[in-house]
Amino acid sequence: MRKSSNPYLPLPARIEEVRAETPDTKTFKVVFCADDGGDAFAYRPGQFAEASVFGVGEAPFSITSTPTRPGFLEFSIKRMGAVTCALHEMIGGEQIGVRGPYGNNFPVEEWKGRKLLFIGGGIGLAPLRSAINYCLDHRGDYGRIDVIYGARSPADLVFKPELEEWAKRDDMNLHLTVDAGNEEWRGRVGFVPALLSELGPSAKNVVTITCGPPIMIRLVLQGLAQLGFSDEQIVTTLEMRMKCGIGKCGRCNIGRSYVCVDGPVYNLAQLKQLGSEH
Amino acid sequence: MPDYVIAKDKTAEWLRRLGEKYAVYAPAADGMAFARTTDYAAALQPSGNPRRPPKELFFPASQTLLTFNHGGQGMEVTEVAAESLNPEPRLLAGVRPCDAAALSLLDVIFSEQYSGYDDPFYRAARSTIPVISLLCAEPLEGCFCGDAPAVNLASPPADVALTDLGDRYFAEARSETGQELIAAGEGLFAAAGDADREARDRAAGELKSRTSEGLPLTGMREKLRDLHESALWRELSQKCLRCGVCSFLCPTCHCFDIQDESIGGQGCRYRCWDTCQFTDFTLMTSGENPRRDPAERLKQRICHKLEYLPDRTDLVYCVGCGRCVRLCPVGMDVRETIEELLGAQVE
């Protein structure tokens, strides 16, 4: 955790590279300007940061890179509101502000020795990617790794070059699907929850981690329950409107839990205890 | 620490001496807020309480966090030193026990212990502005501090706690700073005796009995936990205009927004008060809004104070100051809301 006299002060960071992922999503690779910037920012998979464009504002983004590949941070950002639109206008060499890392993280230590099933939809793969690559970089610590990922169309799949690499690996299984295909698409067509039922994975010694649009999550949770997954085996990461990121400004709570400091990673048992807002 | 008494006609001289070192803030004559004053004879009012609580001296309605400048050399970001926001020493006098309790509740929220991060802006103000409290002679309409567990009427968390004993004030120094404030009144104070202490306790006890309505603020946690799905929230929220007055004027409400303001490449990032009663408080750019419904927002306000924060801190975040009762434009009364919730059937 970064300790500074002013926790609202971001570290200056330079955009190193911008990659267009989909028509509305770009990945920003950023490097801290100060020599020791990276040291002050030690993060774990699943944490997030507040990124800012000075003059426009700040917004929270999950960190999609993995700390096992140090020297930079990556954020995959969909063009949605004022801050994300301003970021989408920016190019390599420009400066943004980054403060964090904030929140809890995926319990990658607890997962050791277990099989992992990642289920992502659309931009929801961004936070999962940090954990997937972290586990691949510690491959020996984990059992079988499956990734189910879907998007509305082939053009909406994020991290395409990386998906190709994952598909080639023989130590993980990537299952791709799109809601609607096109002429070039040779892969599966259908929704993520349907693909989950089709694959019908056993729940035994598995942890499943899911992130995606609300409707996908709802159906995936139903599917997982049918497959015999307990609430403790199902992990997700939440999105909430946030401002301070440090448990002061009072808006991101679900019941007594502040998503910015107690989350964003919860298992389903914890979420059910907190109340009905999700 | 020793207790003192000071004759009422000597407090103006005491505050005048303190005024040589501090800018003295006390309830303004128009009843709106705590404002700077040199009318030391009128600074300690026996009754009433400003509409705006004293939290704004420590947590202003708007506060700059940093400034930036798009110069030729790229972006220059300048930190605002928290200390620079309190350039002249200030002193807050005439704070009611409810508001003194509210400040101690805010201390928890802005502390490092609470969430892992210290808020330097709040702390800088809090550690430099001494507080002199004064027990009310008369409660206002809507006051229910007697039911608030955080409120200690006899000995509130202030540097100096004053209690009206008729012709004199009982003065308890509750901190080293409080001792210094009393030392500045050398020759004006006398040591308090047991009879004075008894009179102080009697005054506090009387006010407590007049402001107690039997609302079980401490015991709301379990009840509220069972009512999250209740249809009552919708019913109770129907009257609400969503103006946010209840939270902007609440001495324990502390939610804020962070925004940028920029003209010609120069600007600042500031925080400003915000309220859970506004629709966009939790609206995400995706269009998702977990508290879209006014019923959800009323639930957030009530449960935040009486369930969620008590769960986190073991403290109840309502001090019974009655501002939300007195100043709600449509007459929503939090005491009635609590009563209705207490009487609700668990679904």
Image (cartoon, rainbow, N blue to C red):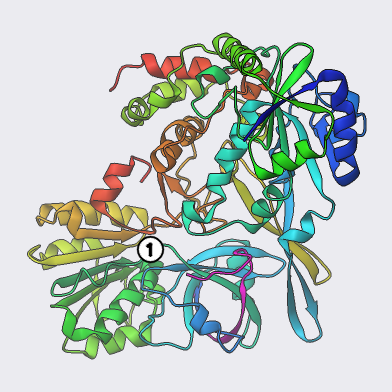
Secondary element type, mark 1: loop
A260 part of magenta stretch:
no
Q: Badge 1 local density, few (<14 within 10 Å), some, or many (20+)?
A: many
In the rendered image of this protein, does residue A170 appear above or below residue A82? Answer: below
The residue that appears at 52% across and 56% down in the rendered structure is B112
Which chain is indicated by disc 1? A
The residue that disc 1 covers is A104
Left/right placement of residue A109 relative to residue A33 reads left
x, y (%) of residue A243?
A: 57, 56
Q: Which span is picked out in magenta?
A: A1-23
x, y (%) of residue B273?
A: 67, 44
Q: Quadrant of residue B6?
A: top right
Residue A28 visible in this rendered orientation of the protein: no
x, y (%) of residue B302?
A: 48, 30
In the rendered image of this protein, does residue B52 appear above or below residue A113? Answer: above
The residue that appears at 65% across and 31% down in the rendered structure is B99
Residue type of the residue flagged with mark 1: Asn
The residue that appears at 80% across and 72% down in the rendered structure is B265
Left/right placement of residue A221 relative to residue B219 reads left
- The residue closer to the viewer here, B209 or B242, is B209
Quarter the N terminus of chain B occupies: top right
The residue that appears at 78% across and 86% down in the rendered structure is B73
In the rendered image of this protein, does residue A169 appear above or below residue A217? Answer: below
- The residue closer to the viewer here, B192 or A248, is B192
Residue B254 visible in this rendered orientation of the protein: yes
A10 part of magenta stretch:
yes
Q: Quadrant of residue A120?
A: bottom left
